[in-house]
Image: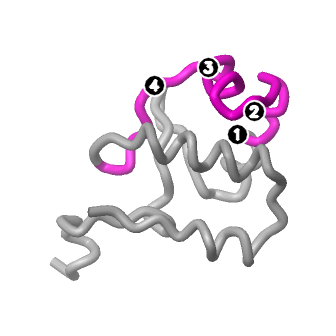
Amino acid sequence: METFILDELILEKEYNVVDLKLMIALKRRLDFNNRIKTFRQKEIAEEIKSSQSNVSKSLKKLIKDKIIYKDGLDFYFSDKYIKFSGDKRKKGK
């Protein structure tokens, strides 16, 4: 089970509609260990009814704000915003 702290992000920072839709689209692609399944910006742009350039700008903003990060070719959500019930760090193990 995962917890996404989207409401805290909305209250904490200034995000536009594309930023928020991008977070939701990326959340839908979550795999194990907070890894976001491979995606193309063009596909996400079509999904959230925006342009590829807006998705690119929002992606850079989310990285800058440390909501997501890139490791190699993969993107991940920060542990601050996504937790799994089986996560050992969460249980203090």
Task: Please state the extent of the stretch shown in magenta in the rendering.
Answer: 33-58
Mark 3 / mark 2, whichever is N-terminal: 3
Q: Amino acid at mark 2?
A: Val
Report if the CB atoms under discs 2 and 1 are less than 8 Å apart.
Answer: yes
Q: Amino acid at mark 4?
A: Thr
Disc 2 to disc 4, how far (Cα)?
15 Å
Mark 3 / mark 4, whichever is N-terminal: 4
Q: Which element carries disc 2, helix, strand or loop?
A: helix
State the residue at coordinates (69%, 34%).
Answer: 48
Mark 1 / mark 3, whichever is N-terminal: 3
Which of discs 3 and 2 lies nearer the camera? The answer is 3
Q: Which residue is mark 1?
A: 59
Disc 1 to disc 3, how far (Cα)?
14 Å
Q: Quadrant of residue 43?
A: top right
> Residue 38 has which mark?
4
Disc 3 to disc 2, how far (Cα)?
10 Å
Disc 3 to disc 4, how far (Cα)?
11 Å
Q: Which element carries disc 4, helix, strand or loop?
A: loop
Report if the CB atoms under discs 3 and 4 are less than 8 Å apart.
Answer: no
Report if the CB atoms under discs 4 and 1 are less than 8 Å apart.
Answer: no
- Residue 41 lies left or right of residue 81; in this view the side is right
Q: Which residue is mark 3?
A: 43
Q: Is residue 45 magenta?
A: yes
Relative to residue 37, is residue 82 depicted above or below?
A: below
Q: Position of residue 74 (x, y in %)?
A: 46, 32
Mark 4 / mark 1, whichever is N-terminal: 4
